[in-house]
Image (spheres, grey):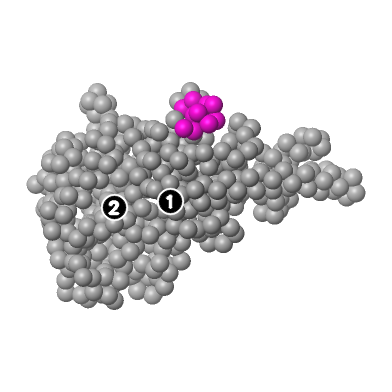
């Protein structure tokens, strides 16, 4: 089932269930009074006022497919990109919401109907996780969810988790509640027999039983002292926020083991292979580069489409960071030192059926070109600084502080300083560097 059909089925399903279907709204977070998040990181971000009863929604049942970006804040996936098979800086979230209109039971049954009847995911491959309660925060076992779910799957396919996994707090938005999650086992039959999928859920490095749909019953409000208090709204049981990752759903339905292999990524990856003359799945390092670029270019594309210009502030800084990150990886591993990302954009216009906009291609080209000029200039400058310190100040090693200074002031990564150090015959003591989060060692 292809990407477009998967989206269409979702939207049609909720349309038939009398939901108002909205378009993907802007990826810029315009709810800044609650949160300093720059980008929307979940579909629900756009509807906070309705949950808090600050505004009344014209529609009480809504569904949409929202582009979300997770680069900053608590839900920050940047470091995983390239190194695993299904994290992305941007993803599309399929979501449905009820503002006092339907209950947790309806939400779970709707989700179940869609994934088993319309998407035809086998019932045996679905695991459901339920909130088991939390004494510290005086939160009860989600008995209601259990009663519903035990009628859907075999009891062995139900697992119970606490505050960490099955209690959802919407970052900075004051809302929270128990969540019921659907996970899907994507392994082959032999592997499923050898080890039950339930042992893999919520485990690190598990690429096989994938969290698919998060169904949150927004029951509580977080007050200014960070206490969880019951939402006084009498309809609070009927406040629902759900989110399912589109890329993961495509991966499951297209029988792939990685979201980078779904139909929308294939043409992007092919284009990158061609431009950089490298092959995907031939070499580990190249795979990391290809995944990073294919992920980042899609995010860069959608941020630029919002009219954001790369610069040193807020959203502009984030898009600049993604551009530079893509360039520095290719610079390091395949010695590319001229613009190339802009050449990938035409394929994105095509995949996402967006009218070609030459302006953003030019913006990207200029940003890339400038970065290489700055890089060249700064390498020369730092070379001179280090040489001067050796000659005039008897510098005999480059320490962590100096590395950090070169990174923060001149944007030079460790591997570049190392090259300079080799040329100047000086050592680097980098012990502390490994634990510093501000500097990426690539
Ligand atoms: N807000 C929840 C999530 O991000 C459900 O949409 O998963």
Q: Which mark is residue 65?
A: 2
The answer as to whether callout 1 falls within 8 Å of ligand 1 is no
Q: Is residue 382 above or below residue 170?
A: above
Residue at far right of view = 392
Q: Residue at x 25, y 45 (%)?
A: 7
Q: Is residue 24 above or below residue 431?
A: below
Q: Which residue is mark 1?
A: 302
The mark nearer the N terminus, 2 or 1, is: 2
Please report the bounds of the magenta region as a residue range. Answer: 271-280
Magenta stretch: dominant secondary structure: helix
Q: Nearer the viewer, residue 238 or 378?
A: 378
On the picture, is 395 further left or further right than 358?
right
Q: Nearer the viewer, residue 370 or 17?
A: 370
Q: Secondary structure at mark 1?
A: helix
Separation of marks 2 and 1 at Cα, in angstroms? 14 Å
Residue 304 colored in magenta in the image: no
On the picture, is 163 further left or further right than 116?
right
Q: Residue 244: give x, y in percent of width and height.
A: 28, 49
Q: Which quarter of the figure has residue 375?
A: top right
Residue 230 shows in the view: no
Q: Residue at x 44, y 33 (%)?
A: 269
Q: Residue 228: give x, y in percent of width and height.
A: 31, 69
Q: Residue 81: give x, y in percent of width and height.
A: 46, 42
Q: Residue at x 43, y 69 (%)?
A: 32
């Amino acid at each position: 089932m292809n990407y477009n059909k998967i989206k269409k089925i979702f939207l049609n399903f909720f349309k038939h269930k009398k939901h108002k279907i909205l378009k993907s709204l802007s990826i810029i977070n315009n709810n800044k009074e609650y949160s300093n998040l720059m980008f929307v990181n979940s579909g629900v971000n756009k509807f906070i006022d309705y949950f808090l009863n600050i505004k009344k929604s014209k529609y009480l049942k809504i569904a949409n497919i929202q582009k979300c970006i997770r680069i900053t804040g608590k839900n920050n996936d940047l470091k995983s990109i390239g190194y695993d098979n299904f994290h992305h800086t941007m993803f599309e979230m399929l979501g449905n919401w009820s503002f006092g209109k339907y209950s947790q039971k309806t939400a779970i049954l709707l989700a179940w109907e869609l994934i088993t009847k319309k998407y035809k995911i086998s019932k045996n491959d679905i695991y459901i996780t339920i909130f088991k309660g939390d004494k510290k925060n005086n939160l009860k076992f989600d008995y209601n969810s259990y009663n519903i779910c035990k009628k859907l799957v075999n009891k062995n396919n139900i697992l119970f988790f606490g505050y960490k996994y099955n209690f959802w707090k919407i970052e900075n938005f004051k809302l929270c509640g128990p969540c019921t999650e659907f996970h899907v086992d994507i392994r082959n039959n032999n592997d499923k027999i050898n080890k039950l999928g339930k042992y893999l859920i919520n485990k690190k490095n598990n690429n096989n039983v994938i969290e698919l749909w998060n169904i949150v019953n927004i029951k509580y409000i977080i007050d200014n002292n960070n206490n969880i208090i019951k939402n006084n709204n009498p309809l609070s049981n009927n406040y629902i926020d759900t989110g399912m990752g589109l890329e993961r759903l495509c991966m499951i339905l297209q029988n792939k083991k990685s979201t980078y292999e779904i139909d929308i990524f294939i043409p992007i990856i092919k284009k990158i292979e061609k431009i950089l003359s490298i092959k995907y799945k031939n070499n580990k390092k190249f795979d990391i580069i290809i995944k990073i670029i294919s992920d980042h270019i899609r995010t860069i594309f959608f941020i630029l489409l919002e009219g954001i210009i790369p610069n040193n502030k807020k959203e502009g800084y984030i898009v600049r960071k993604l551009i530079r990150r893509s360039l520095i990886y290719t610079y390091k591993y395949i010695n590319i030192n001229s613009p190339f990302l802009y050449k990938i954009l035409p394929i994105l216009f095509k995949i996402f059926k967006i009218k070609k906009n030459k302006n953003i291609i030019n913006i990207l080209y200029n940003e890339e070109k400038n970065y290489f000029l700055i890089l060249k200039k700064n390498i020369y400058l730092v070379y001179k600084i280090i040489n001067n310190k050796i000659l005039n100040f008897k510098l005999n090693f480059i320490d962590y502080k100096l590395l950090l200074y070169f990174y923060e002031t001149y944007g030079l990564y460790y591997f570049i300083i190392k090259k300079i150090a080799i040329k100047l015959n000086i050592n680097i003591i980098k012990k502390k560097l490994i634990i510093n989060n501000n500097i990426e060692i690539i």
